[in-house]
Amino acid sequence: MSQVITATPEIEIASIPVRELAPWALFFGLIGAFVLFFISADQGAVSIPAGTAIHEWVHDGRHLLGFPCH
């Protein structure tokens, strides 16, 4: 009888240095905070376009996330 031996390749997981990850984490954290502000806190009082345009655009998202708006 002949035996078949198959070699399985070793999988090496590359590590990402924190110095390369930190700027991206900061960028997406700021974008997330900006989006969260417009969804949760903006009632038209401090919005860049005057009126309640942003409030109306994110109205359903506010209710979906549990923020009251009325």
Image (cartoon, rainbow, N blue to C red):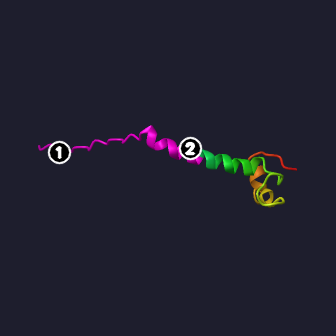
Q: Number of callouts in the render? A: 2
Closer to the camera, 20 or 7? 20
The answer for how far apart the CA atoms under marks 1 and 2 are is 52 Å
Marks 1/2 in contact by CB < 8 Å: the verdict is: no
In this rendering, the answer to whether 12 lies above or below 31 is above
Residue 63 at what x, y percent from top left? 78, 50
Instruction: List the residue tagged with mark 2.
Output: 26
Where residue 28 appears, as percent x and y from the top left, is 58, 48
The correct choice, above or below, for 18 with respect to 60 in the image is: above
Q: Nearer the viewer, residue 34 or 40?
A: 34
Residue at 70% from the left image edge and 47% from the top image edge: 36
- Please state which amino acid type lies under the numbered disc 1: Val
Q: Residue at x 80, y 56 (%)?
A: 55
The residue located at (68%, 51%) in the rendering is 35
The x, y position of residue 37, in whole percent, is: 73, 48
In the picture, measured across the screen, residue 64 lies left or right of residue 25, that is right
Residue 4's tag is 1
Q: Circle 1 — which element?
A: loop
Quadrant assignment, res 29: top right
- Picture coordinates of residue 40, whole percent (x, y): 76, 47
- Write the residue at 78% across / 60% down: 49
Label 2 Cα neighbours within 10 Å, binned few <14 / some 14-19 / many ≥20: few
Q: Earlier in the sequence, mark 1 or mark 2?
A: 1
Q: Secondary structure of the magenta portion, mostly?
A: loop
**Magenta extent:** 1-28
What secondary structure is marked by label 2?
helix
Is residue 3 within the magenta segment? yes
